[in-house]
Image: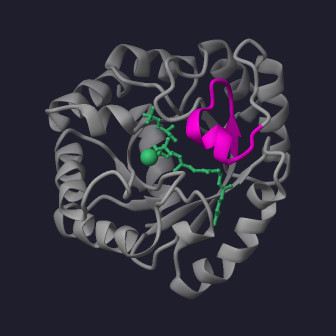
């Protein structure tokens, strides 16, 4: 089964998908694999691998290989640029940062990376990537014209544009480690216009209660990264998040 189908199927059956984001630059491959294994035991549906700085090359390949030794859920690349691709991944969130001012993040990295995706046989999942305030490192690196927190209509406009350009997924990002996630009002307004297209929400989600607010507002998939890196008991934390968002 394709990864996209696998995720959509879980979203339909269980209400919401949980994705664990691992930054290959944050820990050695063995440690990343231990985190991934505990996350899968806690009920996460797939592992996303990426980072906005220094997340490519050998560390990326080795992190993927170790994770694949320890887990059997799909591995999905979340590349900061064309260097964030690896032959060892199952799929890639093939995204355009729609509200970037920098053409590199709108189409150039995609063009430079596309031949590798083709050659390696990685499944591309087309995605509109939209960054809201506060935006964090990824907002800065991606030179995003950040959507104000209290302007759902701007997030709606970009999301609709992505849908009309044929992108299957939309990702509303508040930035890794954000003090607060995207507002429920923005999530709800975007999901309303997306209809069956899948909505991913991430950035600043640290507990089950917050994850549930995002899921109830309309998120089909919830991404958590920082909290997984920071917590002592990964399995327990993922269980908390997963049980809050699944029916
Ligand atoms: C499709 C291809 C080949 C490339 C896409 C290139 C684009 C559009 C990138 C968007 C901008 C960008 C820098 C995205 C990075 C996404 C990401 C992995 C963010 C989260 O990383 P963390 O490592 O959790 O956060 P920090 O970077 O803050 O550590
Ligand atoms: O690290 P956190 O805050 O969980 O954010 C995850 C993801 O949305 C970052 O791209
Ligand atoms: Mg990082």
Magenta span includes 2:
no
Q: Residue at x 61, y 16 (%)?
A: 183
Which region of the structure is painted magenta? 129-144
- Residue 3 appears in the rendering: yes
Asked whether 122 or 115 is in front, the reply is: 115
| In this picture, residue 27 sits left or right of residue 187 | left
Colour convention of the picture: one colour
Asked whether 92 or 50 is in front, the reply is: 50
| In this picture, residue 110 sits left or right of residue 175 | right
| In this picture, residue 209 sits left or right of residue 11 | left
| In this picture, residue 130 sits left or right of residue 44 | right
State whether residue 5 is above or below residue 155: below
Magenta span includes 137:
yes
x and y percent of residue 163 in the render?
79, 45
x and y percent of residue 55 in the render?
46, 61
Q: How many marks?
A: 0
Q: Residue at x 42, y 57 (%)?
A: 49
Q: Residue at x 30, y 30 (%)?
A: 242
Q: Quadrant of the C terminus?
A: top left
x and y percent of residue 51 in the render?
48, 52
Q: Quadrant of the N terminus?
A: bottom left
- Residue 170 appears in the rendering: no
State whether residue 69 is above or below residue 191: below
Query: Quarter-wise, where is residue 83 in the image?
Result: bottom right
State whether residue 26 is above or below residue 70: above
Query: Quarter-wise, where is residue 66 in the image?
Result: bottom left
Q: Residue at x 34, y 51 (%)?
A: 26
Query: Quarter-wise, where is residue 172 in the image?
Result: top right
């Amino acid at each position: 089964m394709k990864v996209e189908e696998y995720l959509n199927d879980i979203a339909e059956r269980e209400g919401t998908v949980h994705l664990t984001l691992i930054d290959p630059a944050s820990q050695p491959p063995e440690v990343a694999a231990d985190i991934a294994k505990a996350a899968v035991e806690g009920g996460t549906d797939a592992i996303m691998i990426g980072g906005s700085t220094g997340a490519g090359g050998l560390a990326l390949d080795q992190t993927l290989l170790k994770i694949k030794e320890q887990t059997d859920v799909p591995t999905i690349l979340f590349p900061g640029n064309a260097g964030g691709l690896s032959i060892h991944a199952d799929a890639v969130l093939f995204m355009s940062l729609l509200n970037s001012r920098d053409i590199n993040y709108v189409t150039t990295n995609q063009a430079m990376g596309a031949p590798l995706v083709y050659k390696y046989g990685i499944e591309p999942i087309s995605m509109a990537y939209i960054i809201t305030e506060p935006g964090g490192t990824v907002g800065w690196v991606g030179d995003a014209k950040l959507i104000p927190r209290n302007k759902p209509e701007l997030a709606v406009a970009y999301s609709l544009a992505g849908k009309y350009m044929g992108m299957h997924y939309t990702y509303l990002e508040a930035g890794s480690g954000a003090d607060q996630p995207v507002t429920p009002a923005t999530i709800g307004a975007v999901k309303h216009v997306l209809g069956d297209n899948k909505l991913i929400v991430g950035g600043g989600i640290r507990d089950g209660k917050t994850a549930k607010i995002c899921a109830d507002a309309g998120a089909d998939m919830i991404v958590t990264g920082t909290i997984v890196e920071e917590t002592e008991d990964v399995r327990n934390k993922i269980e908390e998040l997963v049980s809050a968002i699944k029916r």
